[in-house]
Image (spheres, rainbow, N blue to C red):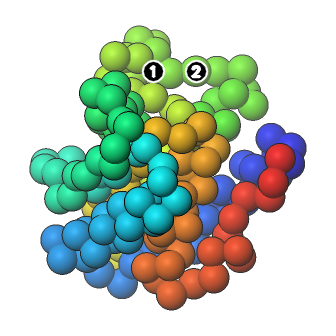
Amino acid sequence: MSLDDDIAAIARQEADLHFDSFSEADAFRLGALVHAEATRRALALVVNIRTAARTLFHAATPGTAPDNDEWVRRKSNTVLRVNRSSYGFGLGLAKRGDSIGPGRGMELADFATHGGAFPVHVRVTGVVAALTVSGLPQREDHRLAVWAICRYLALDPADYDLSES
């Protein structure tokens, strides 16, 4: 799939994958869904759901490292700053030959545009949290986050998946 195709597909994901509401109980169920899938597939990853103020869910499967927690922090910071998926934002910057950094007020120590963090967008309210996955290649981190949100919203994940590259 081309860069433009991925950008268009992610724009559709971000426009359509919205919740009617989102509570702490929803965060637990969504996070547990990702964790269960990672366990089923024997994937080493960290899953995190957080708002700008606090963590609502955090779990890791065997084989992860402290670095995964750092990637989660940086990717979720990006979502909570720009209200877009970290992957979609990063691909858009790359297409324009741009990047994050001091000129954008987004230090690399605190932000990352790698795939894996997706906005938890509540209709009418806006983005209230970020679901973040770390441990797979960035495109796969993104795909797993979108898969989980689709499953949680009772949508067919295949309708929103990025095509195989």
Horizontal and vertical percent for residue 69?
A: 29, 34
If you read the primary sequence from the N terminus, does the residue marked by circle 2 or circle 1 appear first?
2
Of the two numbered discs 2 and 1 in the rendering, the one whose residue sits closer to the viewer:
2
Question: Mark 2: few, some, or many residues within 10 Å (few <14, many ≥20)?
Answer: some
Relative horizontal placement of residue 144, taking residue 55 as reference (left or right): right
User: Circle 2 sits in a helix, a strand or a loop, which is it?
Assistant: loop
- Determine which of the numbered discs, if any, sits on residue 164 in the image: none
The residue positioned 67% from the left and 37% from the top of the image is: 92
- Determine which of the numbered discs, if any, sits on residue 104 in the image: 1
The amino acid at mark 1 is Arg
Relative horizontal placement of residue 54, taking residue 103 as reference (left or right): left
| Image quadrant in which you'd find residue 111 | top left
Q: Considering depth in this image, is 63 or 155 the residue closer to the camera? A: 63
Q: How many numbered dots are placed on residues in this image?
A: 2
Query: Does residue 53 lie above or below 65 as drawn?
Result: below
User: Circle 1 sits in a helix, a strand or a loop, which is it?
Assistant: helix
Q: State how far apart marks 2 and 1 are (Cα).
A: 8 Å
Please say if the residues under marks 2 and 1 sit with CB atoms less than 8 Å apart: yes
Horizontal and vertical percent for residue 51?
A: 22, 53
Q: Is residue 165 in view from this perspective?
A: yes
Horizontal and vertical percent for residue 96?
A: 73, 27
The residue positioned 34% from the left and 16% from the top of the image is: 109
Farthest-out residue, bottom: 154
The amino acid at mark 2 is Ser
- Residue beneath label 2, please? 99
Q: Considering depth in this image, is 34 or 111 the residue closer to the camera? A: 34
The residue positioned 64% from the left and 30% from the top of the image is: 93
Query: Does residue 1 lie above or below 124 as drawn?
Result: above
